[in-house]
């Protein structure tokens, strides 16, 4: 079997990791919105922290994308 | 089959680990925000701890990236 | 098939274990923060215990990294 076949398989598996990172981001914003709608007056001060957390989780998802693109185009 | 084919497969599998680490980060920040919006006055003192936890989980995700990059480029 | 090919496959699978360990760390800190923000006066005395738990979970993730590195570099 051609080794290049496994590049396509690896890129597909990397996308599973990207999807899992999206679940992490979804968990952060889901909990933020759940709390913000219960106590809207505090939401403004906490949104920056929600964004820091989402950036950390999103970063790991972007790394998955980088690995997938490296697999596809090198 | 060429052993190098399995490097691509291994790099894709490492990305699944990266995504799972992002779920861990999402869980930490999700619970932090859920509590911080319920009790905003205590949020400042606990944010440093949320960050320590997120750094520990993020670190394991970065190790996955290291393994993936070692697989791709060595 | 060359046995060395499966080293790369094994290193990728070890990263899934690392990601799952990060989920465990996330669960510990998530629950700690959830409780600490509800009762901030007790948080200082319990943080050391959260750290012990996180270190145990993180340790298992590091063992996965060790296995992955042994697979890659020996």
Image (cartoon, coloured by chain):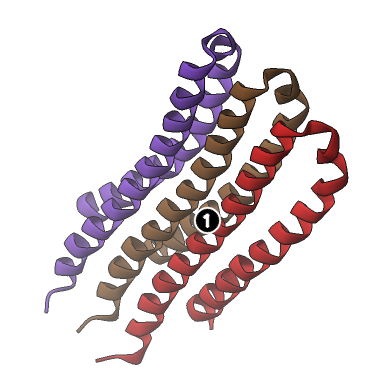
Chain colours: A purple, B brown, C red
Q: Looking at the image, which is closer to me, B49 or B38?
A: B38
Q: What percent of the width, then of the height, locates residue C72?
A: 48, 76
Identity of the residue drawn at 46% across and 48% down = B23
Instruction: Tell me: residue B26, above or below residue C15.
Output: above
Q: Looking at the image, which is closer to me, A27 or A10?
A: A27
Instruction: Tell me: residue B51, above or below residue A5.
Output: above
Q: What percent of the width, then of the height, locates residue C53?
A: 72, 60
Question: Which image quadrant for residue C59?
Answer: bottom right
Q: Quadrant of the C terminus of chain B?
A: bottom left
Question: Which image quadrant for residue B45?
Answer: top right
Identity of the residue drawn at 55% across and 27% down = A52
- Image side of residue C55 versus residue C18, left or right: right
Q: What percent of the width, then of the height, locates residue A70?
A: 29, 51
Provide the chain ID for the residue under circle 1: C
Q: Looking at the image, which is closer to me, A56 or B28?
A: B28
Identity of the residue drawn at 38% across and 76% down = C8
Q: What percent of the width, then of the height, locates residue A39?
A: 54, 15
Q: Looking at the image, which is closer to me, A12 or C21?
A: C21
Label 1: element kind: helix
- Label 1 neighbourhood size at 10 Å, few (<14), some (14-19), many (20+)? many
Q: Circle 1 is placed at which residue position?
A: C23
Instruction: Tell me: residue B54, above or below residue A3.
Output: above
Residue furthest to the right in view is C45
Identity of the residue drawn at 21% across and 52% down = A72
Q: In which quarter of the image is the N terminus of chain B?
A: bottom left
- Image side of residue A53 versus residue A30, left or right: right
Question: Which image quadrant for residue C56?
Answer: bottom right
């Amino acid at each position: 079997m051609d080794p290049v076949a496994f590049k396509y398989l690896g890129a597909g598996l990397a996308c599973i990791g990207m999807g899992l990172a999206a679940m992490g981001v979804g968990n952060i914003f889901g909990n933020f919105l759940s709390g913000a709608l219960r106590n809207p007056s505090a939401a403004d001060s906490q949104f920056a922290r929600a964004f820091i957390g989402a950036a950390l989780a999103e970063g790991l998802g972007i790394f998955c994308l980088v690995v997938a693109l490296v697999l596809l185009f090198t």
